[in-house]
Amino acid sequence: PHDGIHDVKVHIRGRYDRLGDLVPRHFPTVLAGENQPPITDGSGRKQLADWIASPSNPLTARVIVNRVWQHHFGQGIVRTPSNFGFLGERPTNPMLLDWLAAAFSAPVGSSPEACGWSLKRLHRLIMLSDAYIRSSDGGPKLERADPDNRLVGRQNQRRLESEILRDNLLAVAGRLAPALGGPSTRDFASGRRGLYVMTIRSDRSGYGPLFDVADPTASVDRRTVSNVAAQALFLLNNSFVTQQATALADRLLREAPASDAARISRAYALLYGRPPSAEEAAIGLAFLGRAGGARLAVAGGQAAGAGAMAWREYALVLLCANEFLYID
């Protein structure tokens, strides 16, 4: 009775040996209603996929754009991303959600913002908006008017996700491998992007769980964010991070050999995307001077000499700063 593709009988209370009436294949009536055309070709999976992506079903586009918005802002327009029903939160900006959903599903060329179901176009549309480029510091007046930032008057400050933080450490050190595809790796210290580092489900004490990676045994719509002392200790002491600090010091020597001030400016550009203030530059020069001479020499393409350790320690301090770990 279970051979091939066909309609099946209801399993009363889930038991295979207690069968009820034969039920034709169809979608749940709570979603698609009572008047549904019969499914006579195949198992119904293709029909389900067509219905999910149908222009007559606005829920799919709304859910996707809400997830992408949450990725860029830390909170979705609907703050319960897996529950758009009566028990979920109402959209903070319903018209924005509808406009994004319509733009995402509209054929390319039908309007300037049309995405044609392209996630890349949707990311570009959101990231070029005024809302995305706002600072997280909205000022005291805005803080009082909208403390939860439901109307997106400012950016939400948020820490980098664990995979992105690891990739950024490798990137500023010049060790991130840009190659796409290929098998995954168990080597956490590998230069491959975090996307290709194998997830060990039984590991509850490594880097990923420490920095709130998504639980691989469950469906996670939004990650938890914790701030614990062990995270700071990891960044200060773990051999992977200290290796990146050493590689960063070597990179600064190669790319800005003129002076310590030039290297400090290059470090701030790499790590924070801005030049150092006069005070920050003075603090860096003072630290390097106190640490026993900031001069660096080249030996085999790596930092050497009396100032090598000072520069590695300074690079580690810059990597552990909140400005490197958080999006403002």
Image: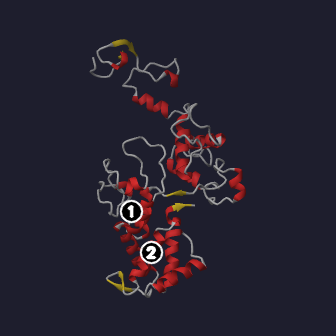
Residue 124: % across, % down: 55, 53
The quarter in which the C terminus is drawn is: bottom right
Q: Is residue 120 left or right of residue 15?
A: right
Q: Which amino acid does label 1 sit on?
A: Pro
Q: Please identify, in this view, whether the residue under mark 1 or under mark 2 is nearer the observer.
A: 2
Q: Does the image show residue 11?
A: no
State the SS at label 1. loop
Q: Nearer the viewer, residue 81 or 284?
A: 284
Q: Residue furthest top?
A: 21
Colouring of the image: secondary structure
Instruction: From the image, tell me which residue sits under label 2.
Output: 315
- Visible residue check, residue 188: yes
Please tell me the numbered disc located at residue 308: none
Amino acid at pointer 2? Ala
The reply, left or right, for residue 124 in relation to residue 294 is: right
Which is more N-terminal, label 2 or label 1? Answer: 1
Point out the image quarter for the N terminus.
top left
Q: What element carries label 2?
A: helix
Q: Position of residue 145 (x, y in %)?
A: 71, 51
Q: Residue 97: percent from the left, percent from the top?
A: 61, 42
Residue labelled with disc 1: 178
